[in-house]
Image (cartoon, rainbow, N blue to C red):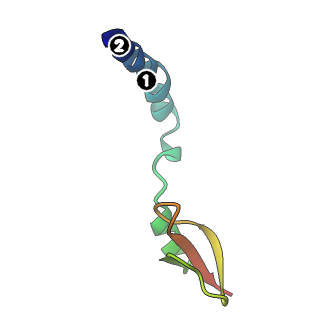
Amino acid sequence: MKIHLFFFILLFGVTILPARKKFPQYGSVDMRRECVKGNGRCKNQCHASEVRIAYCIRPGSLCCLQK
């Protein structure tokens, strides 16, 4: 089991950490802020007069814009 943990940490250090350093903009997008900035609201369901454009924080919450 210790060998699996060692390889997991090694794989994480070799792949994920360099990618975060090289492309920091991909992991730092706040979808809720972007939705509000685009004059939208985060809701569980959009009404018939609204358009769903993206997910806000989690897949259950939607960004709804007025038509």
Q: Nearer the viewer, residue 46 or 13?
A: 46
**What amino acid type should be assigned to the residue bearing mark 1?**
Phe
Q: Residue at x 41, y 21 (%)?
A: 13
Q: Nearer the viewer, residue 41 or 39?
A: 41
Q: Residue at x 43, y 23 (%)?
A: 12
- For residue 49, side relative to residue 24 (left or right): right
Image coords of residue 45 (percent x, y): 55, 79
**What amino acid type should be assigned to the residue bearing mark 2?**
Phe
Q: Earlier in the sequence, mark 1 or mark 2?
A: 2
**Label 2 residue SS:** helix
Q: Residues within 10 Å of mark 1 (few under 14, many from 20)?
A: few
Q: Residue at x 47, y 28 (%)?
A: 16
Image coords of residue 17 (percent x, y): 43, 28
Image coords of residue 50 (percent x, y): 64, 85
Give the farthest residue toward the bottom: 49
**Label 1 residue SS:** helix
- For residue 4, side relative to residue 60 (left or right): left
Quadrant where the N terminus is found in the figure = top left
Indicate which disc residue 42 carries. none
Q: Nearer the viewer, residue 59 or 64?
A: 59
**Residue holding disc 1:** 12
Q: CA distance from mark 1 to mark 2?
A: 10 Å
Q: Residues within 10 Å of mark 2 (few under 14, many from 20)?
A: few
Indicate which disc residue 6 carries. 2
Q: Are marks 1 and 2 in contact (CB under 8 Å)?
A: no
Image coords of residue 34 (percent x, y): 51, 67
Q: Residue at x 48, y 45 (%)?
A: 27
